[in-house]
């Protein structure tokens, strides 16, 4: 099962830091900084940090910059 699939019981798999960094093509250090600065939603499970795919998609959507039309 990959990080963004839903298991047979309907539970969405959470993404770890390494997987998210790979998906975004950024360093793990950058993802850790986003967490430390609380710039991205995350779940803390014991000492582990995990991300819900919907939270990641929402965060990416907020980073979109619309094209400006020059009049």
Image (cartoon, rainbow, N blue to C red):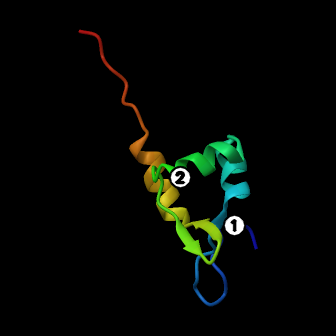
Q: How far separated are the C-alphas under marks 1 and 2? A: 22 Å
Which residue, as the protein is rendered here, is positioned at the far left? Answer: 71
Which numbered tag is attached to residue 36? 2
Q: Give the residue pinned by disc 1.
A: 3
Q: Residues within 10 Å of mark 1 (few under 14, many from 20)?
A: some
The mark lying in front, picked from 1 and 2, is: 2
Instruction: Where is residue 53? Give x, y as percent.
Output: 55, 63
Instruction: Where is residue 45? Give x, y as percent.
Output: 60, 76
- Quarter-of-image position of residue 35: bottom right
- Quarter-of-image position of residue 49: bottom right
Q: In which quarter of the image is the C terminus?
A: top left
> What is the secondary structure assignment of the residue under circle 2?
helix
Residue depicted at x 39% and y 31%: 65
> What is the secondary structure assignment of the residue under circle 1?
loop
Instruction: Where is residue 59? Give x, y as percent.
Output: 45, 51
Query: In the drawing, does residue 53 fall left or right of residue 8?
Result: left
Q: Which of 46 and 40 is in front in this view?
A: 46
Residue depicted at x 65% and y 70%: 48
Residue depicted at x 53% and y 52%: 36
Which residue, as the protein is rendered here, is positioned at the far right? Answer: 1
Instruction: Where is residue 63? Give x, y as percent.
Output: 43, 40
Q: Residues within 10 Å of mark 2 (few under 14, many from 20)?
A: few
Residue depicted at x 68% and y 45%: 29
Picture mark count: 2
Q: In which quarter of the image is the N terminus?
A: bottom right
């Amino acid at each position: 099962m990959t990080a963004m699939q839903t298991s047979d019981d309907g539970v969405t798999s959470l993404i770890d830091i390494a997987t998210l960094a790979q998906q975004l093509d950024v360093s793990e250090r950058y993802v850790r900084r986003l967490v430390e600065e609380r710039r991205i939603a995350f779940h803390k499970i014991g000492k582990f940090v995990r991300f819900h795919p919907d939270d990641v998609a929402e965060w990416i959507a907020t980073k979109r910059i619309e094209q400006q039309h020059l009049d």
